[in-house]
Image: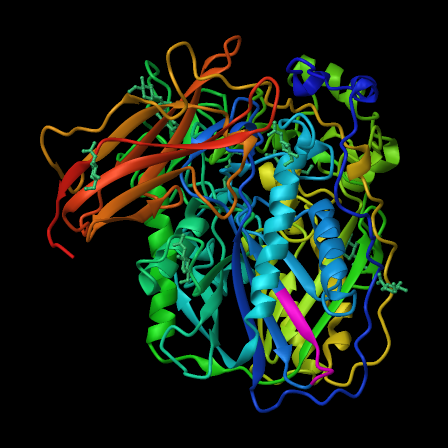
Amino acid sequence: MHIPLLSPLLLSPLDSLHALSAQFLYGLLAPTGFFSAPSSIPSTSNGQYLLGLGIADITGPVVETNMMGYASLPQTDTGLHMRQRARAFIVAETSPSGQRVVLLNADIAMGDSGVRRELLAALAAEYGNTTYHAGNVALMGTHQHSGVGGYLENLLPQVTSKGLHPQTLKAIVDGAVLAVRRAHDSLAPGTLSFGTGRVEGGSRNRSPTAYLANPAAERAKYTDRGGEDGDQEWETSVLKFSGADNTLNGRGFLSFFAVHGTSLYENNTLISGDNKGMAAYLYEASIEPHAIPGNNTYVAGFVQGAVGDTSPNTLGAFCESPGKPYDGLPCVANSSTCGGYAQDCHGRGPAFTADSYGFGSNAAIGKIQADAVRNVLHDGSGTAVQGSVRSVHVYVDMSKHEFVLGNGTKVKTCPAAMGFSFAGGTTDGPGAFDFTQGDNKTSQNPFWEIVKTFITPEPSKEQTECQHPKPILLNTGYAHEPYEWSPSIVDVQILRVGNFVVLVIPGELTTMAGRRIREAVQAKLISSGIIGSDAHVVVAGPSNTYGHYITTREEYSVQRYEGASTLYGPFTLEAYIDKYTSLVPFLADDVTGTPFSDPAPMEQISKAIDLSTSVKFDAAGLGRHFAQVLQDVRTTEPYRSGETVFARFVGANPRNNLRLEGTFLAVDRLDSGIWKMVKSDSHPSTIYQWERESTILGTSAVNISWTIESDTPGGTYRLRYFGDSKPVIGNITAFVGASSNFTVVGGSSV
Ligand SMILES: *[C@@H]1O[C@H](CO)[C@@H](O)[C@H](O)[C@H]1NC(C)=O
Ligand SMILES: *[C@@H]1O[C@H](CO)[C@@H](O)[C@H](O)[C@H]1NC(C)=O
Ligand SMILES: *[C@@H]1O[C@H](CO)[C@@H](O)[C@H](O)[C@H]1NC(C)=O
Ligand SMILES: *[C@@H]1O[C@H](CO)[C@@H](O)[C@H](O)[C@H]1NC(C)=O
Ligand SMILES: *[C@@H]1O[C@H](CO)[C@@H](O)[C@H](O)[C@H]1NC(C)=O
Ligand SMILES: *[C@@H]1O[C@H](CO)[C@@H](O)[C@H](O)[C@H]1NC(C)=O
Ligand SMILES: *[C@@H]1O[C@H](CO)[C@@H](O)[C@H](O)[C@H]1NC(C)=O
Ligand SMILES: *[C@@H]1O[C@H](CO)[C@@H](O)[C@H](O)[C@H]1NC(C)=O
Ligand SMILES: *[C@@H]1O[C@H](CO)[C@@H](O)[C@H](O)[C@H]1NC(C)=O
């Protein structure tokens, strides 16, 4: 059933009731609240672990699907820059009954409770439910903004994707399971070490005026940490996985550094991994230069940190207002506006002038992160990790978490709500409506005033007071129809490998919020004698559940985008600090008992609305055949490095077959009379684009391009296109076509 594109503002529960529910292949094995650690397991004190690393493809449909991150209705994908990957890292104690943890870093905008539930069910079906379970598996999103959308379980993030897309969800879950399986199959004895480095100039604070609301004495402690007076955290922590032969780079690593995955702009429609996906590709390709991306054994994990107020747009935010006097000038700082509107204010990455969509800046921010990790691994400063592997996980109902502040006052969190500045967006992606950041007025746009009551219930006096000073735009914590708009119950999880501890956070902490929770947990670990003074704590998020942003109480009072998106009220961060520190005792070597947990959140996927349409049919067109060359490569004279080779083919809809673990294109090189694939659709130098020619006739075309790298060996090459067509009646069939042969004059020959 096709329902025409609805404005997100008009998507009412009534419409939803008339829409179809999604059908799912996966079982619905719900994980329970927590897992206890068996007592009296000897700790791993000799620094020996079993380590496993694996990578897999999680790329959903690369065309005709809304993208996830910017939550922008017009951002529908049209092709592929680089595939999205899941990278799994397993650390296990060596004793047969030892504990283990799985850190799964996925090139997606955020972890999600629905994805996690499906993933855990699939892992339980394969390995039983005591090996990999809710307690020891962390699903971490790199927070990239150029991936395929439609996989999140809650309604609010589904608004722009117009519901849940089963094909996207299945690609992510299947790929995540495959990455864990590959990691599991690669388990081998090894050691861990960690070091820290500096990602100089790798990010910028995008809400510095909110950061300034934090106490001066607190800010003074961090002035050397990066950015303007420490409003950035340029530290990267690198956990190296080494095999029996302890090489400089080891078998792979997990690095933790905060920078938004918004290097590629909102107007880009090619699926990509953004700057962390790029950093991972660059590192992996530097170790295995001839491996096709995704077919590598070295695995580089670039994990997101306290990302909330960070931006990769390091040049700052400027007005793009042609014809206006302020065109090209910096935006108004407090409100991030140009002439009173947010839409014209755009952040600029380091290679702003290189291209229109941010690809140059994306490569630059990816490279800065990869280089910083290389420095850490190569400078020999790493220290060995020793000690037990532990994990603790509980569900917390953040809509009503009561606890006692440090000064003795009892406070509580509130049901979720979005403030007005949420709709204003950020300088990385300005909002689509006329709201400005940091504005306290409760009524600016009469249209919103009408629709907000229509889509979410009017906030009660109690809710308004609880969320104060946030002016409530969307009272999502009270919106339960047709299913939950925002999560109330979130995953709170900590993983420990020796003295290295990962706080798995269900949201986006700001820079200062990240420091507060890291330091609080570290202090508790040391004071309770669980880890010595060498305890090293990092944050990883948005993970497991998407609970939006987490600011400090001071930043919350300013109500920029991040404060407006801090769901559970002014005490959200304090509540998390209370909860995470309370779980520290469960990381002890000789832990006994289990922590209190709220019940797991209700499954929602079976109720999900799916407004995506299936592929009707493909036709080559009169007198044409699939993969026929419509525009050929140049054969009259050779290509040189830096030039772009281009060909256009008669195409078919790539949604017919995602070609996971495969490719839609190849650059082949003739090697001793045999064609050898040297580039796939996942090399950043290649681009795959699909275009509908006629909906009625079912015809389409595909553009393939390759920009020749400077180290490309000379020789004879060709481009190939792999497609799958769906006839009106019958099965989807694969086809392949090739361009003419062409010559590349290289700097060297192989
Ligand atoms: C694990 O599986 C067993 C046997 O099927 C079941 O009794 C138990 O409840 C399951 N535990 C979890 C956490 O799902
Ligand atoms: C803008 O923010 C700065 C720093 O917080 C503050 O000093 C100034 O008063 C603010 N200006 C307005 C117009 O709010
Ligand atoms: C992937 O790697 C394996 C093992 O090195 C190799 O046999 C295979 O041909 C590679 N596949 C591709 C597509 O490069
Ligand atoms: C895409 O967006 C960027 C950032 O706003 C802008 O500078 C650029 O001109 C846009 N490109 C096109 C083609 O619209
Ligand atoms: C404790 O701090 C909270 C938040 O700042 C404040 O509302 C409360 O009045 C304080 N309580 C005491 C006893 O000072
Ligand atoms: C918004 O209101 C809060 C408290 O009511 C105040 O502290 C803050 O300065 C206000 N922000 C702006 C930008 O006016
Ligand atoms: C694909 O190539 C054709 C022919 O060169 C061009 O007209 C078209 O704009 C290209 N499509 C895209 C999406 O770039
Ligand atoms: C279509 O595929 C199914 C399942 O693979 C197969 O049984 C059937 O024979 C195929 N039909 C045709 C017309 O090839
Ligand atoms: C391309 O090169 C291959 C291998 O030498 C050859 O078999 C083929 O005929 C060539 N194709 C064209 C169109 O010249």
Instruction: Answer above or below: position of 263 versus 344.
Output: below
Residue at x 61%, y 24% (from the top left corner): 730
Query: Between residues 345 and 78, which one lies in front from this camera angle?
Result: 78
Residue 715 is inside the magenta segment: no
Q: Is residue 49 left or right of residue 724?
A: right
Q: Is residue 482 left or right of residue 541?
A: right
Which segment is the magenta one?
Answer: 96-102
**Residue 402: % across, % down:** 86, 55
Query: Between residues 516 and 391, which one lies in front from this camera angle?
Result: 391
Q: Quadrant of the N terminus?
A: top right
Residue 98 is inside the magenta segment: yes
Instruction: Answer above or below: position of 596 versus 653.
Output: below
Residue at x 61%, y 31% (from the top left corner): 421
Q: Is residue 1 left or right of residue 403?
A: left
**Residue 631: % across, % down:** 27, 21
Residue 550 makes an appearance in the image: no
**Residue 684: % across, % down:** 34, 44
Quarter of the rendered structure image containing ligand 5: bottom right
Residue at x 77%, y 40% (from the top left corner): 416
**Residue 721: % across, % down:** 37, 33
Q: Is residue 521 left or right of residue 340?
A: right
Residue 21 makes an appearance in the image: yes
Q: Quadrant of residue 481?
A: top right
